[in-house]
Amino acid sequence: MKSLFIICGMAFMLYAVYKVYWFQTLDDGLPQLLKKGAVILDVRTEKEYETGHIEGSVNISLGTIRERYTELDPEKTYITVCSHGLRSVKAENILKEKGFKHVYNGGAWSDLQETISK
């Protein structure tokens, strides 16, 4: 019984850390950036993208972003999205390393789509 409480406690701690990380890395003001012409960059795989995505978004998977970033305009503003928000943070950091100055984490694509729809 004691082991069950420990496992549940650890699972709760991991979930809490994930949520804090997610809120810390998610950027505010995304709808305003979209109104100003920001491009949504979906970094999920092609198969994931085909199951559903935000209309008008660009799909370059995280696995290929280091090779394909040259397809993007460094002067444009990008909002990275994925399925849960972790890959989008990684993609944001990679693009910033490559010299992109206007890159923001949008988290999960479905959450951003819901925000846009409001």
Image (cartoon, grey):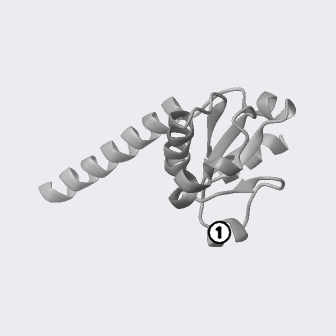
Rendered position, 38 above or below 101: below
**Side of 80 relative to 9 (left or right):** right
Quarter of the image with the N terminus is bottom left
x and y, in percent, of residue 87 in the image: 51, 51
Residue picked out by circle 1: 46
Q: Residue at x 55, y 34 (%)?
A: 96
Q: Amino acid at mark 1?
A: Glu
Left or right side of 91 for 37:
right
The part of the image, by quadrant, that contains residue 16 is top left
Count the labels in the image.
1
Label 1 CA crowd tier, 10 Å (few <14, some 14–19, many 20+): few
**Quick check: 118 above or below 28?**
below
Q: Nearer the viewer, residue 112 or 74?
A: 74
Residue drawn at x 78%, y 30% is 33
Name the spot of residue 93 as percent of width and height, x first: 50, 38
Q: Nearer the viewer, residue 93 or 73?
A: 73
Which residue shows up at 80% across the image and 28% down it? 32
Q: Position of residue 40 (x, y in %)?
A: 73, 46
- Side (left or right) of 55 relative to 47: right
